[in-house]
Image (cartoon, rainbow, N blue to C red):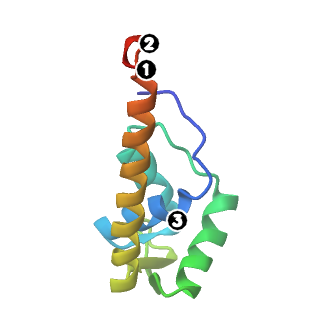
């Protein structure tokens, strides 16, 4: 895609859970993964990411443990929990329903009303 876009309110947690559900990641790795899986369209600011990771951990949706990053630095790695996977499924289903409804509304022609 190449063009970045703003994320909608309420979608950051879902995107983080999706990224971490693919494999355990450290904070910066979450940013990179979200860019990757969105075809470079979504760029999350670090100032938004770390409070969200903290919130998700406090809610029991992710857990963290210290490990070594690829460049041999100490990093906190996040893993999605069972509750986090459940929340991701629920949020994704709701998001998909909303996206389908909006697409249906936007694709309606004058002759259909």
Where 17 sits versus 62, above or below? above
Instruction: Quote the CA–CA distance across marks 2 and 3.
Output: 37 Å
39 up-or-down from 95: above or below: above
Find residue 57 and report its horizontal and vertical position in percent. Answer: 54, 83
x%, y% of residue 105? 44, 30
At horizontal 60% and vertical 63% (from top left) the residue drawn is 49
Residues under labels 1 and 3: Cα distance?
37 Å
> Who's the residue at 38% across and 84% down the image?
83
Examine the rendering and report whether any part of residue 35 can be seen: yes
* Image quadrant in which you'd find residue 54: bottom right
Q: Residues within 10 Å of mark 1 (few under 14, many from 20)?
A: few
Name the residue at 40% across, 15% down. Answer: 109
Q: Write down the residue under mark 2.
A: 110
Query: Which residue is under mark 1?
Result: 113
Check the image and name the residue furthest to the left.
22
Q: Secondary structure at mark 3?
A: helix
Q: Which mark is residue 13?
A: 3
Regarding mark 2 in the picture, which secondary structure is present there?
Answer: helix
Image depth: mark 2 or mark 3 in front: 2
Q: Is residue 101 left or right of residue 9?
A: left
Is residue 29 in view from this perspective? no
Q: 96 or 46: nearer the eye?
A: 96
The earlier-in-sequence mark between 1 and 3 is 3
Mark 3 neighbour density, 10 Å: few (under 14) some (14–19) many (20 or more):
many
Locate residue 97, reporting x and y percent: 37, 50
Question: Depth check: 106 or 7 in front?
Answer: 106
Among numbered discs 2 and 3, the one appearing first in the sequence: 3
Residue shown at 44% from the left, 77% from the top: 78
């Amino acid at each position: 895609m190449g063009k970045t876009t703003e994320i909608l309110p309420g979608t950051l947690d879902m995107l983080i859970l999706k990224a971490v559900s693919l494999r355990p990641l450290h904070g910066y790795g979450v940013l990179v993964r979200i860019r990757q899986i969105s075809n470079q369209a979504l760029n999350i600011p670090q100032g938004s990411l770390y409070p969200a990771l903290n919130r998700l951990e406090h809610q029991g949706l992710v857990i963290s443990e210290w490990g070594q990053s690829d460049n041999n630095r100490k990093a906190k790695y996040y893993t999605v929990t069972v509750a986090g996977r459940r929340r991701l499924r629920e949020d994704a289903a709701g998001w998909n329903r909303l996206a389908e409804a909006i697409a249906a509304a936007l694709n309606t022609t004058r002759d259909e009303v």
